[in-house]
Amino acid sequence: MKTLTLSILTVFLAVTTLCAFDMKVNNKSNIIYYNTNYGLNGYDVKQTTPGLTWPRNSQDYYQFSAGILFGTKLTDNDNTDTKNKTIGISCNTGQISFVPGSNEIDKNVSIADNVKETYPLYISSDYNNNGIAKDPNAPNWPLWNTDNTTFGKYVTDDTKRNNQYYAQGPRFLGDETMVSIYKDTDIKYHIKEQQNDIPYLNLQVEEKTIFWDSDPLNDVVLVIYTITNMSDKTWEDASFAKLFDFDIKKWNETPQDRVKKHSSQDIYYCWTDNPVGPDGYMAISLMISPELDANKYPIANNNYKNYYNGIKIATAINYDISNKLDKYISYDEMTSKKSITPAEGDDQRLLLASETFNLAPGQSVTFGVAQIFGNATLNGSTVKASGDESELAEINDKWKALYEEIYTDGLPIQSTTVEETNNEQENICFPNPTNGTFNLSAELNEESVVEVYDIYGNKVLSSVGTDTNFDLSNFESGTYFISVRNNNKTVYDKIVLQK
């Protein structure tokens, strides 16, 4: 049960932030997931209730809220004193020290005026494939394709969110994407009584939350964080962490939270011991992390698809709410390299913190945290979760499917966004799969436009006119997306190249 103190604080947090900040819920996947534009994940701020439900049509809750922390060593200007700083979400209260905004534009400490309109929580189902919102007063989609950004470039200047500046078009990830940008330069907005004790780092976070609609990825949510050092100081021995308040319970039940680490993989499983609680597990994994050079700085052109060379989780701690009364997790805790222990108490938090790294002024680093949901299975039958790894066959399969999707095929682009009149998904490519050449069954005219995109949203082929024959022989095996604009109608398909 949440303590009275926590309830009062979360109500206060909801009232103070809803006026200025933004919250939305996803439309796709088998997960109901509330999100905000200032770093609180999977939390229904308006109702101050759990913000993650799985499966979608149930009343099975798996998370009260979650957010990130960032800790680092800072040396003063004359190199005589080194201090440790931690910024982010509070373990005990659920408060968070971020506000919506970009330090590239709003360099002053205070948040911008009309922050909800200037820095909303973007959700791709509100946009068409050209990055234009259904709401004519809303800004264009913020993520755009470039040649050297795996996850798209967040364009802070909304006047440049168009094909004139980014000819490769907008970037959409998965079947639905939420995007926000936030910073730590107005801590006093949330924490007035401690504004002098917790100075800001001048940190900026771009967050992308990705959902899929097809099995088994419809039971997965992946949150990608790109953190930029906007200060004039090097952050030494920094650590990225995500803190989960996982409450696995039915609506009115008491959580009996349990967690363990997989014996051979960097996966952490959460479940409940409550006999009337949900049957499933929530598995958590650091799926995306940077490769470092010999001096512990992120390498140039980081290959975020190379999972095994990225840094790993170094610290994993579970706290019971009654035993963790400090508001903030310290840098020493983040870098302690502790491991989770058997639960003492039923209202647990889970902290997962990365190995340490350095980040120079202006340098960015990206992390991706996956939450994967599934029921425990034993000999093909669903069983009540107990932490026995022999029961984890189904959820392990889901994790492997996510791994293969990201590190074999890459993150798939979103083939459709807003449901638009005269836009359809059809099977028009044949043969499919193909070993190189394929044809379109669509009837084309002189003004028809055919475009072929790879999984990263890069346009690899285009044609205007009546030609229905195409050749992918010069490209790598994988999935490609086809768009055919013809007689004021757009039709989409995808084709698999197997050479």
Image (tube, helix red, strand yellow):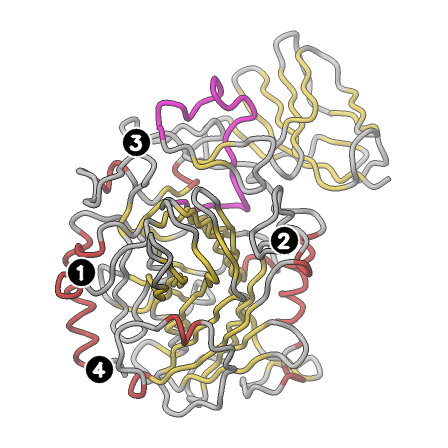
Query: Is residue 288 shown left or right of residue 378?
Result: left
The disc at residue 195 is 1
> In the rendered image of this protein, does residue 468 appear above or below residue 375?
above
Label 2 vs 3, first from the N-terminus: 3
Q: Amino acid at mark 3?
A: Ala
Q: Which residue is mark 2?
A: 293
Magenta stretch, overall SS: loop
Q: CA distance from mark 3 to mark 4?
A: 39 Å
Q: Amino acid at mark 2?
A: Asp
The disc at residue 138 is 3
Q: Secondary structure at mark 2?
A: loop
Eye-nearest disc, 2 or 3: 2
Residue 276 magenta: no
The disc at residue 3 is 4
> Where does the image place residue 30, in percent across and percent down from the top left?
49, 60
Give, as a single range, the part of the protein colored magenta.
157-179
Label 4 vs 1, first from the N-terminus: 4
Quarter of image, res 349: bottom left
Q: CA distance from mark 1 to mark 2?
A: 35 Å
> In the rendered image of this protein, does residue 7 appear above or below residue 236?
below
Quarter of image, res 403: bottom right
